[in-house]
C-alpha cells in the first residue's frame, strides 16, 4: 500500500507541475531497449548473473524552469531482470516507473543536446523465473511470514519487495524535427530482498541496474 501511495504522490506532483506551466510545457513519447541485471549478494556470496534484454515505453513532459533547463517527469512501462550465468534461467520482471529528471538542453547545431539526471520510483507489477525445469512465480512481499518463508526456502516461489527506486542518467540529442535519441543509465538503490519473519538476512542484497537506448518524439 505504501508503495502505491508513493507512486501516486509522485505522479500527482508531476501532473501538478505540468499544469502550472501548461502554456510552455511540451509532451513526448519514448521507447527503447533495456539491458538489465540484478546485482548484489546472497548469503554472503556475490550474485553471478548476466544482463538480460528488455524494453521500455512511455510518455513524459518537459516543464521549463530556466533558460535551457527543464523538469522532465514521466511514466514508463519497463521490463527488467537478469539471466543465469549458466543454463537458460531468466528473471523476468515488469515495472511501472515514474522518473523525474532534471534536463539541460543547450542548442547544438540544428538541434539540442540532452543531458539529464534524477530519481525514479518503480512498482513491480509482475514477474517469473524461467529455467530448464518448471517456471517459478515471482511474488512480492516486504516481510515473509512462516508459510512464505517455507515456499521461498523450498524454491516453490521467489519473493522480493515490490518497490524499487534509484537514480537515472541520460545523454542524447534532439533533432530539429523533434525526433530524439538517447542513452539511459539506471542505478537501483533499493535492496529488494525482503525480511524473513521480521529479520533482515545478513549479507543479502538484490538491486536493479542497467542501461538502455531509446528513441523519442516531442509534440
Image (cartoon, rainbow, N blue to C red):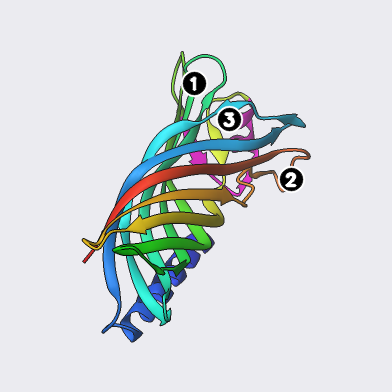
Q: Earlier in the sequence, mark 2 or mark 1?
A: 1
Q: Which is more toward the observer, 214 or 97?
A: 214
Give how far across and how far down residue 9 sits, in percent: 45, 71
Q: Residues within 10 Å of mark 2 (few under 14, many from 20)?
A: few
Q: Residues within 10 Å of mark 1 (few under 14, many from 20)?
A: some
Q: Residues within 10 Å of mark 3 (few under 14, many from 20)?
A: some
Q: Which residue bears the numbered disc 3?
A: 151
Give how far across and how far down residue 174 sits, in percent: 32, 59
**Residue 61 can be seen in this image:** yes
The Cα atoms of the two marked residues, 3 and 2, are separated by 17 Å
Asked if residue 125 is positioned above or below residue 75 in the image, the reply reads above
Q: Are marks 2 and 1 in contact (CB under 8 Å)?
A: no
- Classify residue 22 by image quadrant: bottom left
| Residue at image point 50% right, 39% down | 139
The Cα atoms of the two marked residues, 1 and 3, are separated by 19 Å
Q: Which is more toward the observer, 75 or 200?
A: 75
Give how far across and how far down residue 138 sits, in percent: 48, 35
Secondary element at image label 1: loop
- Classify residue 199 by image quadrant: top right
| Residue at image point 47% right, 55% down | 170
Q: Which is more toward the observer, 108 or 179?
A: 108
Q: Earlier in the sequence, mark 1 or mark 3?
A: 1
- Classify residue 40 by image quadrant: top right
Amino acid at each position: 500500500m505504501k508503495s502505491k501511495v508513493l507512486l501516486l504522490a509522485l505522479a500527482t506532483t508531476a501532473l501538478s507541475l505540468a499544469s502550472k506551466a501548461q502554456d510552455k510545457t511540451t509532451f513526448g513519447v519514448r521507447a527503447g531497449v533495456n539491458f538489465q541485471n540484478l546485482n548484489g549478494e546472497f548469503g554472503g556470496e556475490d550474485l553471478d548473473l548476466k544482463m538480460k534484454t528488455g524494453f521500455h515505453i512511455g510518455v513524459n513532459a518537459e516543464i521549463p524552469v530556466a533558460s535551457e533547463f527543464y523538469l522532465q517527469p514521466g511514466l514508463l512501462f519497463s521490463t527488467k531482470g537478469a539471466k543465469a550465468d549458466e543454463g537458460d534461467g531468466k528473471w523476468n520482471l515488469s515495472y511501472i516507473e515514474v522518473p523525474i529528471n532534471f534536463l539541460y538542453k543547450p542548442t547544438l547545431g540544428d538541434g539540442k543536446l540532452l543531458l539529464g539526471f534524477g530519481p525514479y520510483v518503480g512498482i513491480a507489477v509482475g514477474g517469473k523465473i524461467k529455467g530448464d525445469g518448471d517456471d517459478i512465480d515471482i511474488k512480492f512481499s516486504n516481510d515473509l511470514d512462516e508459510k512464505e518463508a517455507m515456499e521461498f526456502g523450498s524454491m516453490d516461489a521467489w519473493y522480493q519487495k515490490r518497490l524499487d527506486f534509484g537514480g537515472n542518467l541520460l545523454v542524447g540529442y534532439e533533432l530539429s524535427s523533434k525526433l530524439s535519441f538517447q542513452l539511459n543509465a539506471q542505478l537501483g538503490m533499493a535492496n529488494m530482498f525482503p525480511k524473513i519473519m521480521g529479520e533482515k538476512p545478513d549479507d543479502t542484497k538484490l538491486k536493479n541496474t542497467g542501461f538502455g537506448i531509446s528513441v523519442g518524439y516531442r509534440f
